[in-house]
Amino acid sequence: MSKDTNRAAATGNTVGTVGSVSAGWDHLGKRGDGPERNLLEVRNLKVSYGGIEAVRDISFDVPEHEIVTLIGANGAGKSSTLRSIVALEKPAGGSILFEGKELTGMGTEQIVKNGITLVPEGRRVFVNLSVYENLRMGAYLRNDDLQSDLDWVYSLFPRLKERSWQAAGTLSGGEQQMLAIARALMSRPKMIMMDEPSLGLAPIIVQEVFDIIREINRMGMTILLVEQNANMALKAADMGYVMETGRITLSGAGQDLAENPVVREAYLGKART
Amino acid sequence: MAVRYPEQSGAGSLHNKYLTNIRTIPGKYPDFKGLLMDFLSKNLPYFLAGVSVGGQYALIAIGYTMVYGILRLINFAHGDIFMVAGLVTIYASTVMPLYLSIPLTILVTVILGMMIERVAYKPLRNSPRMSVMISAIGVSYLLQNLALYITGGLAQVYPTIPFISNTVTIGSATTKVVTILTPILMIVLVVLLIQLINHTKIGMAMRSVSTDFETSRLMGINVNRVISMTFIIGSFLAAVGSILYFTNYPSVIPTSGGMPGLKAFVAAVFGGIGSIPGAVIGAMLIGIVENLIKGAGWTTFSDAFTFVLLIVVLLFKPTGLFGEAATDKV
Ligand SMILES: Nc1ncnc2c1ncn2[C@@H]1O[C@H](COP(=O)(O)OP(=O)(O)OP(=O)(O)O)[C@@H](O)[C@H]1O
Ligand SMILES: [Mg+2]
């Protein structure tokens, strides 16, 4: 049910002119091509910093071609979860399977090579590199022709094209977020993880970011989205998980969670009705 | 007391000597053109020496500035790597011809620089920067003491490298070929390096690693390899610099890396540490001024100039000529 609402939302948006240049993205396959499999399976993941247990034994799945969101308050352990998936933090326990392959123990470069990319919290664009160079860095591991993908991300984010030679540090916050997403796309990932892409952005830009997220997903991209903006995230997601102090306390279809009274009170700022 | 009677001090008498040298067109203003020509012809040899030494400092300074740019680390061992390069040339030249010992020197120096990073800095990647700095100081002493042990404390005679030791005459100055070769070679290498940094994939990786390790990793960059590359380049340039530098000296001792290393470091700070053009300009300035001071007969003060410069820069513009605003990151 939620999948259908998503499709409707995605086709209804107004972002870019994607269809024509998207041919090269067939490697991802599309929703409903075959039986959905879990691209990512996290089992009993634990992350701790010194004595602090930031992530305490969580398990969740990310099915291929879907949007899965992880929501929760500040300090719940969302970023720690994403960072440990790409080995920026070393898990204290548990297993992370991507396409059935164990990721724990691999280095970040190797994990990225396997097709996962993270749009980090706070954008982290390379401020002293131009927009174009940032995109090239995103494709660092690729040796093939980048032109069609460059054309594609520029069509997704026309504002980046106009600023192609500008130093990324001079972009506005919203533009930097677009660049961070575009840079991640340039690696041709199978799954893209985003850590609070709406952080610090004006409502209209937030809307734009979510439109892009849906658009990318419509093209077959699997997305693991961490958000404070639970309302938007749950609306966009097929599946949602709620994290509290290192644990997953609730999970369900995005739409169902959005209607869940506990979630509404705690994360959507709405009183129980 | 001396302050009240400047005419009695050494500096004062020199000053007076200078004043009497000023030629004037009778009854009119000083003959500026004549003065300039005088100054130039008198100082040309010193100026040339300055350009040359400046070029040698620049080759060392780039190593400091690049490592700092990426690791925010002052590689105190860099001057000693330069000294070791000198010793390697000496020892290698006793058993093989120069056309083999020079490439070997470069190779050994590059490997040494890379090994130092691997062994002494890489294990401390997540430690406070102070720890890495102390490790660098340790490596510096280690290299000096190893050199002391191997040389037995005796000055080792530097071989005469044929072509670059030949003399040439330029205007009023007679000098060695190396004096002319150094700035040319330095500029060629710097241009190549800047091309590498600005227009190649590894160069782009170096620039991104210098701003953000983690995000660079997320791009699939092997950060350790990029850091190794930085040490390779720095050591390569120091090795080239050592050949050009020690050719002008009779011998190498374990502390031979100290002064040139320190001056190159000041040059890097002056230029804005992290900036390659800054390091080159700083090095040229120090090289030229220090030799002009020697030309003026104040040889004793020529080294002091460098350190006065360091103090002035640190007091008034700590970020140096082209330094970015102090970002205390990484
Ligand atoms: N590098 C670190 N060292 C020590 N503690 C850390 C570190 N990073 C995170 N933590 C702690 O781990 C816990 C979870 O942090 P995390 O960043 O994963 O939360 P989050 O859910 O992403 O929060 P936010 O929504 O504010 O970004 C917090 O208590 C935090 O203080
Ligand atoms: Mg976070």
Image (cartoon, rainbow, N blue to C red):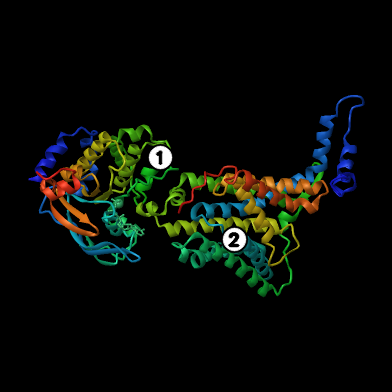
Q: Nearer the viewer, residue A129 or A148?
A: A129
Q: Is mark 1 within 8 Å of ligand 2?
A: no
Q: Which chain does tag 1 point to?
A: A
Amino acid, disc 1: Ala
Q: Which residue is mark 2?
A: B76
Q: Are marks 1 and 2 on the same chain?
A: no
Q: Which chain does tag 2 point to?
A: B
Quadrant in which the N terminus of chain A appears: top left
Q: Residue furthest right?
A: B26
Q: Which residue is mark 1?
A: A168
Element class at badge 2 = loop
Q: Percent x, y for residue A95?
A: 23, 65
Say which mark, if any, is on residue B115. Answer: none
Q: Is residue B211 visible?
A: yes
- Compared to residue B29, the image places residue B327 above or below, namely below
From the viewer's perspective, is B59 left or right of A173?
A: right
Quadrant in which the C terminus of chain A appears: top left
From the viewer's perspective, is B233 left or right of A7?
A: right
- Where residue A14 sits, quadrant-wise, is top left
Amino acid, disc 2: Phe
Tell whether label 2 touches label 1 (CB within 8 Å).
Answer: no
